[in-house]
Image (tube, rainbow, N blue to C red):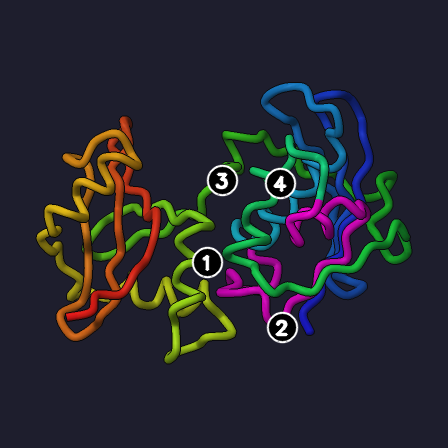
Amino acid sequence: MMTLTTVSERIASTKARIFWRVGTKNKGIIDLNLRSSSEDPALVGELIAIQYLLFDMKVFDRAPGGGSGYKLVASKGAIKKLALGKSSKKFAVKYASFLLNRMKGVTIEVSQKLEFMANPDEALPIVIEEGKDVRTQEYAEIITPTMGALKVTQHAVEQYEERISSGCPKKPWASLTKRLMHPDLRILPLDTKILAHKERKYGRSDNIEAWSHPTSTFTYLVVIDDKGNRVLVTVFERHE
């Protein structure tokens, strides 16, 4: 199992230091500056650093396509609770959303041990800025050949997971993104009843797109937000 170990500490209300390692030799220190003050900067900083290490630095030489086969040993017990959707720290939910979609199924353990971590007297910390060097968002974003940049909500992943019966049911994120990356996806006309329902739900229907593959029953409902971003809000099956 590929394991990333992190230990965080508060430096200020807008700054945290995160020690990290993969094995005993691949290790480092991150000094993370938050965009605004937080009631628990160490927790938020650790969550941001984990995302940065997995998806930007790619400490496993690739970005994970799912949580299966990966383990996070984190210093904050709240991280494990957030991954289970049971934490009372609501301010941290958006920072932990990747644990419920892209990394769903990841094994999480808790430890504050600094054994084998980099020594701050010998290792120069990497300084990263939230929102500049690493983006934190409630959505996971992928670049698709047909829709361009697409933000994927946790709800869409959950809806897909409930319906999937082929492909990789144990790796819903990897399975869903593989389908979304298909070059033959196309826009489908939406039934007037569906449009009326979506207008009641989202307030309007002129910004809604339904995408699908000609040989698939899956439909991917996309809402274009006020900034022009495509957001995958749900997945359902057509029964023709």
For mark 1, does the 10 Å Cα neighbourhood hold few (<14), some (14 to 19), or many (20 or more) residues?
Answer: some
For mark 4, does the 10 Å Cα neighbourhood hold few (<14), some (14 to 19), or many (20 or more) residues?
Answer: many
- Residue depicted at x 76% and y 44%: 78
> Horizontal placement of 194 versus 164: left or right?
left
- The image quadrant that residue 43 belongs to is top right
Element type where label 1 sits in the image: helix
- The image quadrant that residue 34 belongs to is top right
Q: CA distance from mark 4 to mark 1?
A: 23 Å
> Horizontal placement of 44 versus 165: left or right?
right
Element type where label 3 sits in the image: loop
Which residue is the site of mark 3? 138
Q: CA distance from mark 2 to mark 3?
A: 23 Å
Which residue is the site of mark 4? 48
Query: Which numbered disc, 1 or 3, marks the residue closer to the eye?
Result: 1
Which amino acid does the dot numbered 4 rest on? Ile
Q: Position of residue 73 (x, y in %)?
A: 77, 57
* Residue 69 counted in the magenta span: yes
* Placement of 200 over or under 96, stated as above or below: above
Query: Which numbered disc, 4 or 1, marks the residue closer to the eye?
Result: 1
Q: Are marks 2 and 1 in contact (CB under 8 Å)?
A: no
Which residue is the site of mark 1? 158
